[in-house]
Amino acid sequence: MFKASLLTVSLASIPVSAQIIPDNTLPQNSVVTPQGNIRQIDGGTRSGNTLFHSFERFSVPTGETAFFNNAVDIQNIFSRVTGSSISEINGILKANGVANLFLINPNGIIFGENASLDIGGSFFATSADSIIFANGTEFRATNPNSPPLLVINIPVGLRFRENPGSLVIRSRSTIIKSDNIGQQITTRGLQVTSEQTLALVGGDVRLEGGILTAPSGRIELGSAAGNSYIGISSQSEGFALNYNRVENFQDIGLSDFASIETTGERGGEITIQGRQVNLTGDSAMISSTLGEGIGGDIFIVASDSVTIEQQGGLFAEVRPNATGQGGTITVETGRLTLTNGAQISATTSGFGQAGNLAIAATESIDLIGEAPNRENPSGLFARVEAGATGNGGNITVETHRLTARNGAQISTDTFGFGNAGDLFVNASGVEVVGSTADGRFASGLYAQVGEGGVGNGGNLTINTNQLIVSQGAQISTTARNTGRAGILTINANNSVILSGTAAVSEPQEDQRSGIFVSAEPPIIDESGQPFITTADAGELIINTPELIVENGARISADNFGTGGGSNVNLNVSRLIIRDGGQIGAGSLVEENAINNERGSGGTLTVNASESVEITGTDTIGSTVENSRLFTLAEGTGNAGNLNIFTPNLTVANEGEVNVSATATGEAGSLNVEANSIRLNQASLRAETRLGTQGNITINSREIQLRRGSQITTNSLETGTGGNITINSNQLVAIENSDISANAQAGLGGQVIINADAVFGTQFRTQQTSASDITATSELGAEFSGTVELNSEIDPAQGLVELPQTVVDPAALIAQDACKKGQYSSFVNTGRGGLPPSPQESLRSEETLVPLIELPPDIESRRHHSPSHKSRVQRNISPNLNQPISSLDIVPARGWIRNEKGEVILVGYDPTKTGVIRQRQQIPNQCDRQS
């Protein structure tokens, strides 16, 4: 007890400046010599080019330096702490030459705000228990042993005990010093020299405002639980760690503006491996390329989750004037969450190509919101910045569930001179919801050419079970200037649901939820001249069993440029457009356009194996929007065709299917093939204003128009009315439902109806309150079109009418003398079936079965078998023309009781009060009446 007390007093009396204490466990022990604020460390045990130091305590106070005074040919310095205290480094760690410095303390290490490095090689700080060499020997901090006697220079692994200590980095000091040739260099936080490794490996690893820097080098952060082994391998830029034999990890956190950076002539690599990796308080990891070299990668593996908040992020950049390629960012985890403006991005601002993003989360990816300053949305980005010349990188996302909400985005885009990258999403469920509170950023998935960008937009592909886009969220590919938009492909095994508009007080047209492919409007350049998009608008393909577009949502392919329009192909089982939902393809003119010179719109094709349903309206802002399927041309360009192939087409409650041209362009053609078409207060329309075309072709077994429904190819102003061709088994148009090809100041169109039956409508020279078929012109009858009605039933008859005067059936029976006989009979033979047509009745015919002659052997047996003979004679009449006698059936007129007391019905009046008819001979001509 007394000795222990003396030891405690002795340690307590050691000044703070003397916290480096050798432990005397080596053959040649370490020697610490104070020299002012420098603690020079000599001695140690040397093995080849490796130097071993061992300390009971090792801490460096603020303003002091721990100087490892090694020989310049030493390659690796291994320093262990065998005592029970944590190492606190708040000063400088220094070594000679290019030696790599390893600091091992199982209790943990804290780097204070003023901690820094002055070494020429790599730096390792770890709370491992020991370091392993190639021959299996260990340099242990617990149960310390002597270093290996063999000449060994390179370590191969780190071994951890049960509860490894934590590493805490608060260092953020800035030091300006001169290098070997007199140039000033600035170091920040813990920094190694160019192309070296800075590795921090322990239990929990926390950067609390700390800064780690390795220009063009490598930074490793690893967090392992107890009883783990981490491999070490030599690399050109120092060392790399291998975690294959780690079963359980612990957590890594960056907070309070902490940063990890490997920016240099070529970007260095950053590798993070743990259980939970959290970046908060604007913390970031950055790998930037400043010169010609290929950028380094950022690689994060978290067995549980990665969370980035508050404008923090992972950034791989090609800086201005750099020509190297940007690095790839890879994240592999269970759950990834980005909130409050956090981003993962690969960009180029120079002349090199941006890097790629590869994001994989086995459970979920949640992207939420925007930065507090409302300048940056949360999300994943691969971008060519304004002024850059280089292509953007690709983004690949794989997860079980992907959610982007409240303005968060995933985007590949170009604002410079280069093509945008492609975006690939593979997820069981994808949900894109809402926008920022002010509606400035819509949540979405984008592959686009931004304003000022000159290049092609990327392709966007989504493979999922279910895709939901709602509350103003969007998915789009765009083209600007001379670049074309990419192809947008959605493959959903279950359904695609688009719903609603942005949750703002008065949502605008561009705040609809939806899927969009577009060639964007012209922009005004620095000279004030319009820069018109001349490229094609890409293509949109959706493959899913069920596609629902509702509550003002939209799918559109718009061409605001002079290039070709975008085709839309919808391959579904069921298409439902309801409550103001819309699907369209157009050649459009923006508001306040300089001119209306535009390219053609794309073709819209719907292949629905079960049904198409279009119904209802919705109010967006102050405008009532009908549910509709359409193609449109607003300028000089022509509208595309609209093709619908489905067994059942239902359009109701002000729903619309239309092709139209509102200026000089031609309207497209509407082609419908369906077994059944039902219109109820709805329309199929093809309209032109100044142009021509706008034809409708319908092939259907059954067509029904009700409650003011219309099939029209009308033209406005000087346009020519389009043509309507209907091929159907049955056409029914009732309740003021019209089929028309009319014109205002042009020629009327042509209506051709080929139908087995037409009911409820007829040709008229002008429209009435009844159901009409017209092809008129307001210029006069000589300018009207033609109506050709080919039907087996005259439509003038309408539905088949029953006679107005009821006929007494008794008057149809002929009167003759037979009815006055007492026992007359009457037989009336009917038609035996319905007539084949209204004009011809069936003739009653009896079915005759010819007699057969018996074979000779039967005939011979008949003579030898009396019973058989009589049986055959009974069954085969020798003369079918001989009348067959039968008893008359007389209705009962009363009843009597016989001697046995039985009641018997009789055909006479037993009371003898009625008329008793005597059987009379019926004339032959009365035997049968027909």
Image: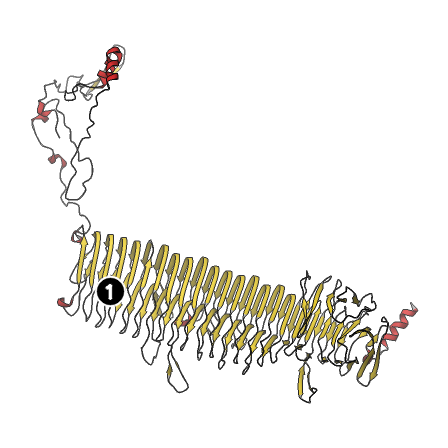
On screen, 453 above or below 809? below
Examine the rendering and report whether any part of residue 282 can be seen.
Answer: no
Q: Residues within 10 Å of mark 1 (few under 14, many from 20)?
A: many
* Pick the front one: 64 or 291: 291
Is 225 displayed left or right of 497 in the figure? right
Q: Is residue 767 visible?
A: yes
Quarter of the image where the C terminus is located: top left
Query: What residue is drawn where x is 17% and y is 45%?
Result: 802
Return the residue nearer the eye: 875 or 781: 875
Q: Quadrant of residue 62?
A: bottom right
Q: Residue furthest right?
A: 2
789 to 171, vertically: above or below: above
Please determine whether, in this image, residue 847 is positioned above or below residue 420.
above
Residue 336 lies, in percent from the top left, at 57, 66
| Residue drawn at 20 percent across, 60 percent down | 751
Q: Is 465 on the left-hand or right-hand side of 914?
A: right
Which residue was labeled with disc 1? 713
Residue 115 is left or right of residue 779, and the answer is right
Q: How is the image coloured?
A: secondary structure
Q: Residue furthest bottom?
A: 182
Residue 457, given in percent of the width and then of the height, sits at 44, 72
922 up-or-down from 371: above or below: above
Disc count in the image? 1
Disc 1 residue type (three-letter): Thr
Whole-percent x, y for residue 312 in the image: 59, 74
> In the rendered image, which quarter contains the N terminus?
bottom right
Rendered location of residue 301, percent (x, y): 62, 66
In the drawing, does residue 670 fall left or right of residue 541? Answer: left
**Element type at mark 1:** loop
